[in-house]
Amino acid sequence: MAHKDDELTKVAFGISEATASMRSDALRLLEADALLHAEWMAGLATNHAAPDSVLRRVFTLDPRSEAWSLLGRRELSPTAAMAAVAHPDPEVRSILVGNPRLPTEVYGALAEDADPAVRRHMVLVAHTYNVELPTEVVVRLATSPYGGLRSFASELVGLPAKNLLMLAEDRDPRVRAAAINTRTWHRLPPSVRAAAEADPDPRVREAFERVTRLVMPPPTTISAFLTETDEDRRLAAARTAPVDADLAAFLATHEDPCLRERAARNPHVPTPLALRLANDPDPDVRLAVSTRADLTEEQRAAIDYTAPQDRYPVPAWVEEHFDDPDALREIAASSHVMLRRGVTRAPHLPPDVIERLATDEDYYVRAMLCENDHAPHELLVEMLADSERWVLLTSRRNFPRPGLARFADNPNHRLRYAAMRDPHAEPELVERLSHDPNDMVRHHAASHPHLPLPRLVELLGVTAQGMARTAARNHALPYDLMHQLLDVARVER
C-alpha cells in the first residue's frame, strides 16, 4: 500500500520526489468522503478542458446527487453535454433539458430521446423559450403520431411553411387550434384562416377570435379606444398607435397618469400637446415628455424631470439612430442624462463618443458604457471598485491587460481579484491569492490555470465553500489526475 501511495503522489498528482511531503495530502484524498467526491464530480462535469474519457465516467453517477443541479444551469462544453445526453438515467437527461445554454445538436438529441417524458419536456421548453431545434427534428415532431407533440410543433422556430399548413388542417382539433396563433397567422393562407373561423370545433374558433383580436390594427379613435376590451392593446395603442387628434387630446388629459405617460411617449401626439404635459404633477409623465425625439435641448432642460437611479429602457428613437455616427455624437452631447445612458447601448460607438461618455458625470452613463464591448480598459478598472456587477466587468474583452498584477496587494478585494486577469500573472502571485481572506478571490485563484499544481492538489481536498469543486474545474488539471480523482471516488472506468 505504501508503494502505491508513493506512486499516486509522484505520478498521478504529478509531484516529484522533491515534493514528496505532499504524500499526506494524497492520503487525505484517498480517504475522502462522499461529499468530497460529489464536489469533484460537479467540478469535472463543468470543466471545459475535461476530455471525453473523463466526462463519460462522470456521467455514469447517481443523478439524484445535489451536484446534478449544475446540469440545468452551468454552461457545459459540447462534449460534456453530449455525455450527459448519453446517460442511461432519463432523470439526468430531463435535468439537462432545462439548461438554456446547450448547443443546438444537444437540444435536437433530447427532442428525440428514447424516453417520452424527456421528449415532451424538451419540446415544451423549445415551445416556451423559442429554442431553435434542427429543422429535420422540427419536421419529425410536426409529423409525429402523437397529437400533443404536433400541437407544440406548430410554434417551434424553423417549422417549414408546408408543415405548418398541414398542422392548421390537422385531423385533431387540438392541433388545428394550436396552429392558429399570432406567430403563425401571417404565414397562413386566407383559405385556412376562413376555415378556422367556420371550424366545427369551438377550440379552433376561439383560437381564431383570439388571434384576430390581437392582430387587428390598434384603436386610433376615441370610439375605438373606448370599445377596446383588451387592456394590453389599449395601453400599447396609447403609447405607439397613430392616434388621431381627438384621441391624442383625450389621452393627454386623462385622469389616469398611466395613460398620460404613454401619451407623452407617443410620437404621434403633436409636440405642442405633449409639451402641455411638461408640468404634469406626475414625475413619470414629465420624464416621458423630456425624452421625446421632437424636443429641443432648451425644451428638455426646461422640464423638471427626475432621472431614476438605475438603468432605464432606451428610447426607441435613440435606438433607431444606433447606426448613424453623427446622430450618436449629437445624442451623446445632450444635457439629458437618460439619452446619454441610452446611447451607451449602441454596438458601434465612434471613438470620440466613447471618450466623451467615459468621462460623463453620471455614474450610470459610465456603468452602462462598461457593458459595451468597446468600453475603455481604464474605465473598466475605475468602475470595478464600486460597481454592483463588478465580476462581469472583469470578463469584458477589454479588461484583461498586462499590468493588472499591480493590484495583488490592494486593500480592495475586487482589485485583488482583477490582478489575476493579468495575462502575465505569475504562479507565485496566484498561489498567494489562493490564501486570500476573500472567498471570491480564493475561488478565482483555485480555478486559475497558473496555480501551481501542489496548491491545486491541496485545494482538491478542501470541502469548505465549494473549494474542491472549483479546483476540479481548473482547466490546468492534468488528465491523469482527473481520472485519479474518479478512481478515488470509485467511479468505474
Image (cartoon, rainbow, N blue to C red):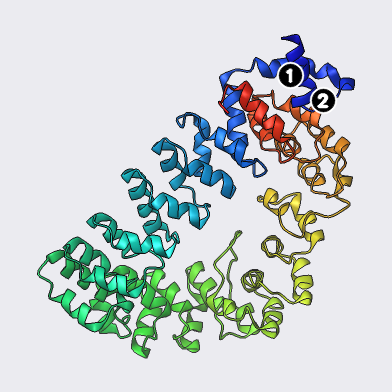
The label shown at residue 15 is: 2
Is residue 435 among what the camera can see? no
Compared across the picture, whether 167 is left or right of 232 comes to left
At x 59% / y 66%, what residue is drawn?
A: 306
* Quadrant showing the C terminus: top right
**Is 390 in front, or is 445?**
445
| Local secondary structure at mark 1 | helix
Which residue bears the numbered disc 1? 26
Q: Is residue 196 above or below residue 148?
A: below
The label shown at residue 40 is: none
Q: Residue 482, percent across and down? A: 67, 32
At x 45% / y 80%, what residue is drawn?
A: 266
Mark 1 closeness class: few <14, some 14–19, many ≥20 residues within 10 Å: many
**Is 168 in front, or is 465?**
168
Residues under numbered marks 2 and 1 in contact, where contact means CB atoms less than 8 Å apart: yes
Q: Residue 29, percent across and down? A: 68, 19
Q: Is residue 150 above or below residue 266?
A: above
Picture quadrant where residue 361 is located: bottom right
Mark 2 closeness class: few <14, some 14–19, many ≥20 residues within 10 Å: many
Q: Residue 323, percent across and down? A: 64, 81
Compared across the picture, whether 127 is left or right of 52 comes to left
Q: Amino acid at mark 1?
A: Ala
Q: Amino acid at mark 2?
A: Ile
Q: Residue 362, percent across and down? A: 71, 64
